[in-house]
Amino acid sequence: MKKYDAVVIGGGPGGYVAAIKTAQLGKKVAVVEKEHLGGTCLNWGCIPMKSLIRNAEVIESLHQGGVYGFEISGVKADYAKAQQRSRQVSERLARGVGYLMKKNGIDVITDEAVLKKDRSVALKNSGETLAAENVIIAAGAQPARLPMADYSARSVLDSRKALALTKAPGSVCIVGSGAIGLEFASVWSAYGAKVTIIELMDRLLPSEDADVSAAVRKVYESRGIAVLTGTAVSAIDARSGGVTVQAGDKTVKCECVLISAGIRPAFAPGESGVKTDARGYIVVDDQMRTSVPGVYAIGDVTGKLALAHTASAQGIIAAKAISGMRTEPLDYQSIPRCTYGIIETASAGITEEQAKQQGIDYVTGVFPLSANGKTLTMGHSDGFVKVIAGRKHKEVLGVHMAGPHVTEMIAGAAGLLKLEATLDELAEIVHPHPTVSEALMEAAHVALGEGIHI
């Protein structure tokens, strides 16, 4: 029986980062991954999706040639090549993770792990067992399934099946308007698909600030994407050549349906004794400890915030905890949240609705990107930057953005929240001109009642 200081179950952004950090702290580490290093993010999620989005952006730019003073005829968009490029990008990054494992002396075992009650890890395929002083569960999550959908049908897609397509659908119904649903809508619409988005809640991106949701809907509908909010799907019929979706009192017929209605944890506690909550997520403390001594959990299985960078941050905390180091609790509310596509969104901190629910006396400052020099030069001035702050002390409580490149700006806003910055301090930070980032400073001026360029 091989013995390790730590065995990590899962090689995604949480698992492989936890493994590297633990190894750097002098521990003997193994990673058990049943498919490919990099997990969902690198192989079937974030990375290939962003590659496809980049292709869609190029197509949109070509269609807007007249705006920039050039004409192109005979353009042919080959979705198969775009999909192939996305796979190449993913494979390159996954190979890079493999290199990092070797560099840090980490054993990588391709197998399916089962955690036992004595903290040993059984390997399903080989029949071997690993002994571990510590175990980090980083098993991730999988798409939630709707009971009325026949997932064996080729025309019923989850995100992984959708990324494997080598031809863009002619028409598609997307159930769920979180990041996955909106990003696929962006890509396929750029390739000419007729897209309908169905959302159970009353707005797109229901977890985001209401103003962000409204801006996103306006842009998506302007691109010809149909949006049905506050609508429940009651039936999905994929028995014929296409798909018929019953959504409220409407019947939507399409070539295929993508179901992006959330996720569920990819971990069953079995005999391990690890405590889970009512939703099946593993219960952890601030150092990622589970109910079983020596067993930690990170990433999507914890149900905290299903984002790759959250998993990585949790992984570093778990590694430090194993080594007896001091750690700081994660403020999940302040971790940046991003959506890509036709219009990017990015946020950190509380929304205006949450401020109201918490009884906070607050002020807001909103700066429209239509008044920003850089976005006007780019020809993409839809959106805004919104700052929420306490009225009395002017502490920044939330930042919400919609527009071009805002996903590149939100880390700075998250830093402001981390450092407990005030509106005055934000307004005094000299921002470079012309940049989209200026809008953050301008929003602070507006919140102070001292708007300059609006």
Image (cartoon, helix red, strand yellow):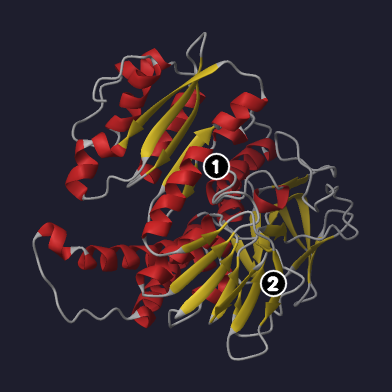
Picture coordinates of residue 58 (x, y %)?
A: 27, 65
* Front residue of this view, candidates 294 and 380: 380
Image quadrant of residue 114?
bottom right
| Name of the residue lying farthest toward the bottom | 241
The amino acid type, in three-letter code, at marker 1 is Glu
Image quadrant of residue 186?
bottom left
Picture coordinates of residue 34 (x, y %)?
A: 66, 70
Kindly identify the residue that appears in the image at 53 percent across and 82 percent down.
255
In the drawing, does residue 68 fall left or right of residue 78?
left
Quadrant in the picture for the N terminus: bottom right
Say if 54 sits above or below 287 in the image: below
Kindly identify the residue that appears in the image at 59 percent across and 34 percent down.
333
Answer whether labels 1 and 2 touch (C-beta < 8 Å): no
User: According to the image, label 2 marks what residue?
Assistant: 111
Kindly identify the residue that appears in the image at 42 percent across and 37 percent down.
411
The amino acid type, in three-letter code, at marker 2 is Asp
Say if 422 sits above or below 266 in the image: above
Q: Earlier in the sequence, mark 1 or mark 2?
A: 2
Q: How crowded is mark 1: few (under 14 residues within 10 Å), some or many (20 or more)?
A: many
Say if 419 sits above or below 80 in the image: above
| Name of the residue lying farthest toward the front | 249
The span from disc 1 to disc 2 (Cα, nearest Å) is 38 Å
In the drawing, does residue 213 fall left or right of residue 18?
left
Q: How crowded is mark 2: few (under 14 residues within 10 Å), some or many (20 or more)?
A: some
Point out which mark residue 208 bears: 1
Picture coordinates of residue 153 (x, y %)?
A: 65, 85
Picture coordinates of residue 402 (x, y %)?
A: 40, 43
Q: Can I make out residue 89 in this image?
A: no
Count of marks overlaid on the render: 2
> The residue tagged with tag 1: helix, strand or loop?
loop
> The residue tagged with tag 2: helix, strand or loop?
loop
